[in-house]
Image: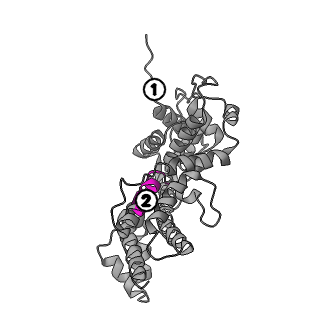
């Protein structure tokens, strides 16, 4: 008689349930986060999210703001709970493992789990390869990260034709770069303005922006400063994306849900009367939409640039 196949999420739930039953995870103690589950069991972030959701539905764990997911109550042990075996995959041959495949797998992991979830071993697991085999194609994790940045930034594309006015071109540059950072939340924190990494993939964007500024009355250093200002604004806003994704994965709360847990504290601060404008915001219909915030800020920046260029 055929044995019914148990899903990875069900097996992980069973193992964590057994650890709670044995007292390895006591009441009030944190259970593994989604990222820890993906790293330990080699599963996708969606599977890890389903694991914690199932445990919450069973009433075994709860989300504590600022702490994470903790054990809510003990459970009676069950001797028949299966454990999760290590994932077994066919090891690719030397001709199947390439730098491009390694980088693509690394980007997929970082997109889903952030750079904290990225390691040479983790990439090897996803590729079904021996960890040491990766070093024949990339020197180390730092080299792999540079290649990831290069590949991600090469996704930026210049628009067809350059007939638009300067403001429209710079707005396109900002919004299209934002799209790249949105697609890869880890990318903005990985980049540096003061110690720029040698990533050729970023130069297509830079060259296009400098070309758009050429002839607007600025000298080359001033053009480069405008380019850096625009880039820094986009990157600076995008830096918030990865920590928010990590916080949501760890706590199980999105930003709106988390803010609701802080409402009483904010109101107690506002009640002192020392911050009337802050108190007014709490009663206003204000919704923090990071995409809308980015768009408005970009408009303010470009308005200021236009006014500055008019004085030349």
Residue under label 2:
178
Whether residue 288 appears in this view of the structure is no
> Residue placed farthest to the left in the image?
285
Does residue 126 lie above or below 4 as drawn? below
Q: Earlier in the sequence, mark 1 or mark 2?
A: 1
Counting every numbered tag in the picture gives 2
The quadrant where residue 132 appears: top right
Is 17 left, or right, of 98 in this rendering?
A: left
Q: Position of residue 229 (x, y in %)?
A: 50, 71
Instruction: Name the quarter where the N terminus is drawn.
Output: top left
Element type where label 2 sits in the image:
helix
Q: Is residue 293 above or below residue 86?
A: below
Q: Is residue 174 magenta?
A: yes
Q: Residues within 10 Å of mark 2 (few under 14, many from 20)?
A: many
Q: CA distance from mark 1 to mark 2?
A: 41 Å
Whether the magenta-drawn stretch holds residue 144 is answered as: no
Q: Residue furthest top?
A: 1
The residue stretch that appears in magenta = 173-186
Q: Nearer the viewer, residue 16 or 146?
A: 146
Q: Which residue is mark 1?
A: 6
């Amino acid at each position: 008689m055929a044995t019914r196949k148990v899903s990875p999420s069900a097996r992980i739930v069973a193992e964590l349930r057994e650890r709670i039953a044995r007292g390895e995870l006591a009441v009030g103690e944190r259970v593994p986060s989604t990222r820890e589950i993906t790293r330990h069991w080699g599963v996708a972030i969606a599977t890890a999210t389903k694991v914690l959701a199932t445990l919450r539905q069973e009433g075994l764990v709860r989300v504590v703001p600022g702490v994470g997911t903790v054990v809510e109550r003990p459970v009676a042990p069950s001797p028949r709970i299966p454990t999760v075996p290590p994932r077994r995959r066919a090891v690719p041959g030397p001709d199947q493992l390439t730098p491009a495949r390694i980088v693509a797998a690394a980007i997929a992991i970082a997109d889903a789990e952030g750079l904290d979830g990225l390691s040479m071993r983790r990439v090897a697991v996803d590729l079904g390869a021996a960890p040491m085999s990766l070093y024949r194609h990339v020197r180390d994790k730092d080299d792999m990260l540079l290649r990831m940045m290069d590949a991600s930034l090469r996704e930026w594309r210049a628009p067809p034709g350059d007939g638009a006015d300067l403001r429209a071109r710079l707005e396109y540059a900002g919004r299209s770069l934002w799209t790249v950072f949105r697609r890869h939340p880890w990318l903005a924190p990985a980049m540096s303005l003061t110690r720029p990494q040698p990533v050729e993939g970023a130069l297509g964007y830079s060259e296009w922006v400098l070309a758009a500024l050429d002839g607007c009355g600025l000298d080359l250093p001033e053009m480069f400063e405008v380019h850096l200002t625009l880039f820094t604004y986009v990157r600076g806003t995008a830096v918030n994306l990865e920590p928010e994704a990590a916080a949501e994965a760890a706590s199980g709360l999105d930003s709106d849900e988390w803010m609701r847990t802080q409402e009483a504290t904010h109101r107690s601060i506002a009640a002192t009367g020392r911050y009337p404008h802050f108190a007014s915001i709490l009663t206003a219909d204000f919704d923090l939409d990071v995409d809308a915030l980015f768009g408005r800020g970009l408009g303010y920046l470009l308005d200021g640039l236009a006014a500055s260029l008019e004085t030349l």
